[in-house]
Amino acid sequence: MTQHLFLPIIGPLLGAVLCLALRRRLQAQRLVSLVLTTGLVAYLGLVLWPDLGRGGGYLRLLLGSWPAPFGIVLVADTLSALMLSVTGVTALCVLVYAIGWLGDADQVDHFFPLYLVLLAGVNGAFLTGDIFNLFVCFEVLLVASFGMLVLGGKHAQLEGALKYLAISQVASAMLLVGAGLLYGTTGTLNMADLSVRLALPAVAPYAQVAAMLLLIAFGTKAAIFPLHFWLPASYHTPPTPVSAIFGGLLTKVGVYALYRSYSLLFAQQWPGQRPLLFVLAVCTMVVGVLGAVAQREIKRLLSFHVISQIGYLILALALATPLAMAAGVYFVLHIILVKTALFLVAGLIERATGTVDLYACGGLLTRKPLLAGLFLVNALSLAGMPPLSGFFAKYGLVLAGLQAQAYAPVAAALAVSMLTLFSMVKIWIQGFMKRMPEGVYPQDAVEPLLSAAATALAACALAVAIAAGPLWNLAMQAAQQLLHPAGYIRAVLGG
Amino acid sequence: MVVLVAVLTGVLFATGIYQMLKRSVLRLIIGLALLGHGANLFLFAMGGLRPGLAPIIGLGPTEQMVDPVPQALILTAIVIGLAMQAFVLVLSYRTHEEAGTDSLDELKAADGT
């Protein structure tokens, strides 16, 4: 019944091979990647979710039919399914946008295979049930992201990629050492089995070391405060569709890995763990938003907001109550869609004005009212204005914080929201309200594909707000599964 | 044996990090490679070190077997490391072509103002 769980990984990989074979035929490459990504979304909606409902919230696939703690196992629970779904929808919209955006100068014939490999790596990270395959999936998505980062080969891209690669490799070494330590201590790599064995008091010191190593590794990928410097140096350099999928999706894979490992493996907290997560969350929020306020380029500004929003997700992990985790899960769904949509809108602004500098553009409110509307909805959602999705996410998080009497982090979260609103208003005033400065000659090209993709993604973000009730229930279910790993363990080990 | 491997892992990590703290891009790459090897060696030691024993069933009593799983993991990690090293070498070559410098301090094109 669950024999299909490998499809989200193997499908994009086969597509990537096909795209490589069709290297000189751009139309065929576009068709293959579109069909595959649409197929992925259809699979998730028509097969995975119904099966997940029938399977009691968990699905597992034993690869090669090896029994659970010994073989490789793929697991889907509510969180995995939610992440896969939002990834599929985002990937489809960004793919359409990329087809409209990328030209020969961006080495477009290399884009599609890399994009599909990236998708396979991300899906694999969401589905894998053992810690070493998590490492492998991270490497797969990283190596694809390195290739995408340097598409076009401009000077700034190469430098950004070099820094991103160096820091990612250090993080990967930490992840490898952490996984090795866990194996040396417990003799297993299966995360459900690890969860059982790490609960024994005898292994507590090793578990703490491994917890810190994995925090460094996943924290680097998620761009948590002292490990975030690579992100604003690299994410704004590649072509806009690449920036969009990176800014929207990649850091959240790191957050997912943190949610998974800190609920399943390191739930037995050592005394300093929660205060440490609180400090990291607040610093990430504050440093990110302060960096954003100082920026004058839209994509760079949005890159800093990526960091700031990660802080909220870590705050949910630090609180670790059912309400907080549900808010965190809902927040991830919201932020992936809204952030990607904002990057796509930034690309449209760039196309409409011919510049990325906020001070050099303007007058878009009258010239491109649809674009203005798209930006406004997503920007207000990012800042947390009711009745948009950002409001529900932040409301849940703040409520959970107040219930847990964590007043200082809640105050920081609210202040950061104000600053987020401030920097969004800055884009609004500079880009849309202000009169067009002289000397800028905007092209009035109509780009239906780009606008359609951005609108579709914004519509999905709105749908997250409209369907807040059912989605919140799903997020609550995911939070319960995270906080009570007994069900996960039973589903994987089959006891 | 355990002490030797432990010291060697430590030396690899230390020299790797020391090289990465230098300003030269080439030294950064060498540092990354050493760090990766240190991690691999650490993984190797995690399987238990028993000189002269093969991880193959049937060569002797199973109690005296070496755990084959870490060795399989290292193989995977070495292959991944090889791909990354190849990529970073090409990337640094292209960066050197574009920027005309080997100093990390002078690579500021992506930092902006």
Image (cartoon, coloured by chain):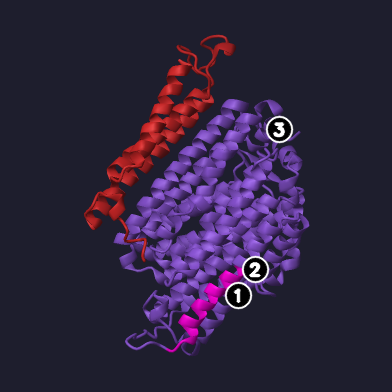
Chain colours: A purple, B red
Amino acid found under the numbered disc labelled 2: Gly
Range of residues picked out in magenta: A417-435
Amino acid at pointer 1: Leu
Residue A20 sits inside the magenta stretch: no
Q: Alpha-carbon distance for marks 2 and 1?
A: 8 Å
Quadrant of image for the C terminus of chain A: top right
Q: What element does badge 1 sit on?
A: helix
Q: Is residue A480 left or right of residue A61?
A: right
Along the viewing direction, whichever of A135 and B59 lies nearer the viewer: A135
Same chain under badges 2 and 3? The reply is yes
Report whether A47 appears left or right of A369: right
Residue under disc 2 on the same chain as residue under disc 1: yes
Q: Is residue A233 above or below residue A433?
A: above
Q: Residues within 10 Å of mark 3 (few under 14, many from 20)?
A: some
Tag 1 residue: A380
Q: Main secondary structure of the magenta part?
A: helix
Where residue B36 appears, x then y in whole percent?
41, 35
Determine the secondary structure under disc 2: helix
The answer to if A433 sits in the magenta stretch is: yes
Residue A153 in sight: no
Q: x, y percentage for residue A37?
A: 53, 60
Judging depth in this view, the residue of A28 and A290 nearest the camera is A290
Instruction: Give the vertical position of A172 relative to A24 (above or below).
Output: above
- On the image, the x and y values in percent for residue A281 come to 60, 54
Please name the residue that numbered disc 3 is placed on: A199
Q: Residue at x 43, y 84 (%)?
A: A362
- Whole-angstrom CA distance, mark 1 to mark 3, is 43 Å
- Any mark on residue A457, and which? none
Q: Secondary structure at mark 3?
A: loop
Q: Are marks 2 and 3 in contact (CB under 8 Å)?
A: no
